[in-house]
């Protein structure tokens, strides 16, 4: 089992209570519906996902991605959007999202007129060479054009697993794994050690699986048998490990996204770090500005500035000493583009 790196462990840490002693907040209410969205058919039914998909904020390809949903989980389809290209769905955390209708073909198949007896509907098929993995499962169009497919066999979709929304701090009781789907047969994302505190956002109806919150919103699952209720002392320990503010002399460690500031090790927000020689170059940049940094926690990562209010992450991107991560702000992306256009740092070649 692969050990979880610090940045991943930080992503799993309970973000709702870090640096706070108040009880965990209840789940956020669903976002308000966009008036322009017209539902032409209400479905209100759960469907197992035949492949891993993305749910978006609106029924458009350029709408922001809300979350990735893994193959095999059950998703409630609320209705069909006008045009039959998109479905409105209820996400496990209470939000409303939109997915391509082609991603859950059973929805439109079940709402269409019944097939005539002489032309029965075809069952779902997969390649006989090997089972499709969550990250590489073929879409219906892929299945029809894959030249490597030698034959097809009927594939039974996994049984639907219902989840109930909760907002609960729990502690890993002993070393275990985090899975991409709620089954021990699913691929492991990483391992977590005993004592790690996680935020559970939903629990399966059979009480066997916990859906845990991660910084990048990817679904992740831990067996309930590996968890126990977190005590206030556990939460306080996590808060002490990730304080709201950190100040001190800064040293770049293994990657340009990882620093030691004073006595604390932290990850810079919005960065994909690079190793040597860029770590030495970032250290020189920090030293040039006095080496002392003042950092504020954002989620499980930190935004760090010099005494002159220079954002170190943004300056690293502008110098080509790092790449923008998934959470990069528009200013960070703009700084990285400036470095790319000027062929600085990692963009020099």
Image: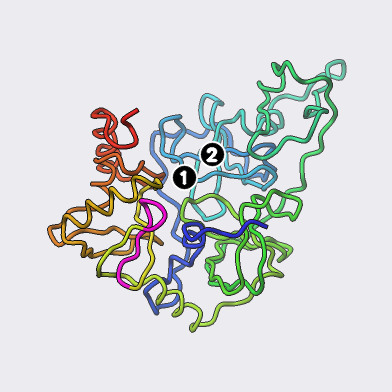
Q: Is residue 22 left or right of residue 119?
A: left
Magenta segment's dominant SS is: loop
Q: Which residue is mark 1?
A: 66
Quadrant housing the C terminus: top left
Q: Which residues are magenta?
A: 253-262
Q: Are marks 2 and 1 in contact (CB under 8 Å)?
A: yes
Up-down relation of residue 304 to residue 133 (above or below): below
**Residue drawn where x is 49% and y is 65% of the image:** 13
Quick one: 74 or 251, which is closer to the camera?
Answer: 251
Outermost residue toward the left in this view? 308
On the image, the x and y values in percent for residue 211 come to 60, 59
Circle 1 packing at 10 Å, graded few (<14), some (14-19), many (20+), is some
> Residue 190: which quarter of the image?
bottom right
Element type at marker 1?
Answer: strand
Query: Tag 1 or tag 2, which sits nearer the N-term?
Result: 2
Q: Position of residue 252 (x, y in %)?
A: 33, 57
Instruction: Write down the residue under mark 2.
Output: 54
Q: Is residue 114 left or right of residue 221?
A: right
Q: Kindly identify which numbered label has been placed on residue 210.
A: none
Task: Identify the image quadrant of residue 172.
Answer: bottom right
């Amino acid at each position: 089992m692969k050990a979880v790196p610090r940045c991943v462990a930080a992503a799993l840490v309970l973000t709702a209570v870090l640096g706070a002693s108040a009880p965990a907040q209840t789940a956020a209410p669903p976002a308000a519906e966009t008036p322009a969205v017209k539902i032409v058919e209400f479905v209100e039914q759960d469907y197992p996902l035949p492949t891993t998909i993305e749910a978006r904020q609106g029924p458009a390809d350029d709408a922001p991605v809300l979350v990735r949903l893994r193959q095999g989980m059950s998703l409630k389809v609320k209705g069909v959007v006008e045009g039959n290209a998109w479905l409105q769905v209820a996400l496990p955390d209470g939000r409303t999202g939109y997915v391509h209708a082609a991603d859950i073909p059973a929805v439109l198949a079940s709402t269409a007129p019944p097939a005539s007896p002489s032309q029965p509907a075809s069952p779902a098929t997969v390649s006989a060479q090997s089972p499709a993995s969550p990250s590489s499962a073929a879409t219906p169009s892929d299945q029809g054009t894959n030249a490597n497919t030698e034959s097809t066999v009927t594939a039974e979709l996994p049984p639907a697993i219902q989840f109930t929304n909760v907002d609960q701090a729990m502690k890993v009781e002993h070393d275990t794994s985090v899975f991409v789907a709620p089954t021990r047969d699913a691929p492991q994302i990483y391992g977590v050690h005993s004592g790690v505190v996680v935020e559970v956002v939903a629990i399966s109806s059979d009480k066997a699986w916990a859906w845990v919150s991660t910084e990048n919103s990817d679904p992740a699952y831990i067996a309930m048998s590996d968890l126990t209720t977190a005590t206030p002392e556990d939460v306080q320990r996590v808060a002490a490990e990730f304080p709201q503010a950190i100040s001190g002399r800064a040293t770049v460690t293994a990657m340009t996204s990882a620093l030691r500031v004073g006595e604390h090790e932290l990850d810079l927000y919005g960065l994909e770090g690079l190793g040597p020689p860029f770590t030495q170059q970032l250290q020189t940049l920090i030293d040039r500005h006095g080496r002392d940094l003042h950092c504020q926690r954002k989620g499980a990562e930190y935004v760090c500035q010099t005494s002159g209010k220079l954002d170190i992450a943004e300056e690293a991107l502008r110098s080509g000493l790092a790449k923008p991560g998934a959470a990069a702000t528009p200013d960070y992306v703009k700084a990285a583009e400036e470095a790319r256009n000027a062929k600085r740092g990692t963009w020099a070649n």
